[in-house]
Image (cartoon, rainbow, N blue to C red):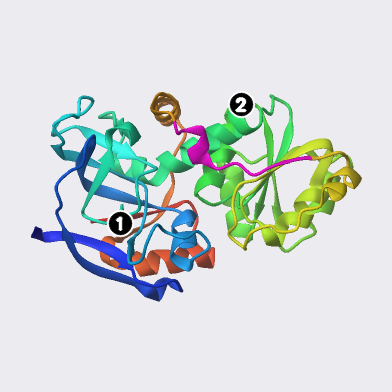
Amino acid sequence: MKTDDAMRVIFRSHGSPSVLEHQSLAINPLGPGQVRIRNHAIGVNFIDTYFRSGLYPPPALPSGLGTEGAGTVIECAEDVTQFRIGDRVAYVQSSLGAYATQHCVDQGRLVHLPDDISFKTAAGGLLKGLTTICLFNRVSQPKSGDTVLFHAAAGGVGLLACQYARRKGIRLIGVVSTEAKAELARSAGAWATILATDDVAAQTRQLTGAKGVKFVYDSVGRATWQASLNATAACGHLISFGNSSGPVENVALAQLARAGSLTVSRPILFDYISDSAELRSYAQEFFQCVREGIKVQVGATLSLSQAERAHELLESRHTTGSIVLIP
């Protein structure tokens, strides 16, 4: 079945943002445990570009795109017990297909959205907020007074990390691409900033009395890998959590030893929130952070029909904060 206003974004082959298409959305029966949501806002994340480009293979082609959104429940399968029609909800790890006016999500992947958190804030910030919370509390545990280096500090995750670090008393050095982004990162809470075009490792060591930092958070990947290694203090921890410049390859353990007995991890958020209870606990922590003043900056709000433009903006690195699509 199809309805006149049900639309989705798909791609039939891998490539540039131009492969994205729009088509009517077939309304299929719900499976066990599923909830149908009318999206009010959809989050655009770098992982979406990985599926589109082919870096991460989708289950099949053609494929939907996107895993994050916020909206209201419009239908529940008979066995759904945790949600009701009319509930405000958000999700960050659905099956591909969130770029749509409606989306079906397993009830175990949904969180209740409090009335004081807007759909736009949830779609623009929940996945990035959960990423920040996990990076600073599960993947690593920097303490008040520690100095850390954070790449892409004016991006969606970066601006939340700047605020979260300041809240915890952590001195965050943000790597950014422009002076305007540097000012934005500092206003969000970065202790210092470094331009990506400078010698990041040398600048980091200058700021830390030649020691380097205990923790480096790198979502850029291949282009910044060596600089991140060189900026990490002896016995420090380098967290590689993204591939915006391409994946890091051919990592040699001996190189980590020579760099000062470094620890390296490659976390994926979804492994940390695979349990529904953990997902909802982290979501509640994020919502509380928003109530206490952490701001989700949405740098661009576009219509669902502008998904191609959203990907162009994201990959150009000309945006700050999050990108949200409105159906």
Viewer-proximal residue among 79 and 155: 79
- In the figure, 317 relative to 272: above or below? below
Asked if the residue under mark 2 is in contact with the one under mark 1, i.e. CB atoms within 8 Å, the reply is no
Q: Quarter of the image holding residue 14?
A: bottom left
Q: Quarter of the image holding residue 101?
A: bottom left
Q: Position of residue 111 (x, y in %)?
A: 32, 31
Residue located 60% across and 41% down the image: 267
**Residue beneath disc 1:** 99
Residue located 28% across and 42% down the image: 105
Q: Is residue 262 left or right of residue 82?
A: right
Q: Is residue 175 left or right of residue 67?
A: right
Amino acid beneath label 2? Lys
Residue located 39% across and 57% down the image: 59
Q: Which residues are magenta?
A: 263-274
Q: Is residue 231 left or right of residue 84?
A: right
Mark yes or no: residue 203 visible: no
- Which numbered marker is on residue 168? 2
Viewer-proximal residue among 108 and 306: 108
Q: Is residue 263 left or right of residue 188?
A: right
Residue 270: in magenta span:
yes
How busy is the neighbourhood of tag 1: few (under 14 within 10 Å), some, or many (20 plus)? many
Q: Position of residue 58 (x, y in %)?
A: 42, 59
Q: Position of residue 306 (x, y in %)?
A: 31, 67
Secondary structure state at the residue bearing disc 2: helix
How busy is the neighbourhood of tag 2: few (under 14 within 10 Å), some, or many (20 plus)? some
Viewer-proximal residue among 211 and 66: 66
Mark yes or no: residue 295 visible: yes
Secondary structure state at the residue bearing disc 1: loop
Amino acid beneath label 1? Tyr
